[in-house]
């Protein structure tokens, strides 16, 4: 599993000529990094007398951020697994008409699965940004920049995942599915951008007032 490798091993595999892991796994990793930073700010806020009034809220956010980090981490491997299934479908025999038909069905099915994984990343990003926003506003001001980086990494995850959804949708013949998912991608991107920009604005204001 990718998530059990050392950082250097993962980067070496990412940089290799193998097409997987690729951008989809990196998108999920970016989400995990963003969620981890949100958790870090929570941990740096909890236990501080100055932030006693928000300790309960920070503990709740910490639990949710760690849960999201876990989801993103699972998706790092899940994206590569989905890509490998697509490659397996393309390698199916195509000598007879029946084989061609079965191969086509398999390709379309795995392409849909491959599109849904990064879309799941995007959906988790929206939830993670909601947490990052609260942490940026109420968390330890000394870690404001970390809250900002959290938002930037999360939006990067969303943008990156969107590209991976789109490249898979381009090969799917089910027009209704493609249209539906295209609309989701557009909506999620818009929401992610607005929330990330709002968080960065909060952070810059905090830093400026320090």
Image (cartoon, rainbow, N blue to C red):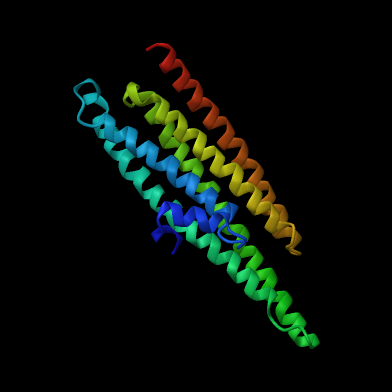
Q: Is residue 140 above or below residue 181?
A: above
- Please report the residue visible at 25 percent of the width from the left and 24 percent of the height from the top: 51
Q: Is residue 124 above or below residue 133?
A: below
| Quarter of the image with the N terminus in it | bottom left
Of residues 143 and 56, which is closer to you in this image? 143
**40 left or right, relative to 23:** left
- Please report the residue visible at 37 percent of the width from the left and 12 percent of the height from the top: 210
Residue 208 figure quarter = top left
**View extreme (top): residue:** 209
**133 left or right, relative to 88:** left
Spot occupied by residue 18 in the image (x, y as percentages of width and height): 60, 63
Of residues 177 and 51, which is closer to you in this image? 51
Q: Give the tally of numbered discs.
A: 0
Of residues 62 and 141, which is closer to you in this image? 141
Spot occupied by residue 143 in the image (x, y as percentages of width and height): 35, 26
Residue 79 figure quarter = bottom right
- Please report the residue visible at 50 percent of the width from the left and 43 percent of the height from the top: 125
Spot occupied by residue 101 in the image (x, y as percentages of width and height): 76, 81
**View extreme (right): residue:** 97
Residue 80 figure quarter = bottom right
**157 left or right, relative to 4:** right
Q: Is residue 25 above or below residue 198?
A: below
- Please report the residue visible at 36 percent of the width from the left and 49 percent of the height from the top: 67
């Amino acid at each position: 599993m990718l998530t059990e490798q050392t950082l250097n091993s993962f980067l070496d595999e990412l940089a290799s000529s193998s097409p997987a892991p690729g951008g989809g796994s990196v998108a999920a990793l970016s989400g995990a990094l963003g969620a981890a930073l949100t958790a870090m700010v929570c941990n740096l806020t909890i236990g501080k007398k100055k932030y006693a009034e928000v300790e309960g809220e920070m503990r709740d956010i910490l639990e949710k951020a760690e849960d999201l980090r876990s989801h993103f981490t699972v998706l790092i491997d899940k994206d590569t697994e989905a890509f490998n299934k697509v490659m397996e479908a393309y390698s199916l025999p195509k000598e007879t008409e029946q084989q061609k038909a079965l191969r086509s069905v398999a390709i379309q099915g795995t392409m849909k699965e491959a599109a849904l994984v990064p879309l799941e990343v995007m959906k988790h990003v929206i939830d993670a940004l909601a947490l990052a926003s609260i942490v940026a506003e109420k968390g330890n001001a000394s870690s404001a920049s970390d809250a900002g980086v959290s938002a930037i990494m999360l939006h990067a995850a969303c943008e990156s995942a969107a590209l991976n959804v789109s490249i898979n949708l381009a090969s799917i013949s089910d027009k209704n599915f493609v249209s539906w998912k295209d609309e989701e991608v557009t909506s999620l991107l818009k929401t992610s951008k607005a929330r990330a920009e709002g968080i960065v604005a909060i952070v810059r204001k905090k830093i400026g007032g320090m």
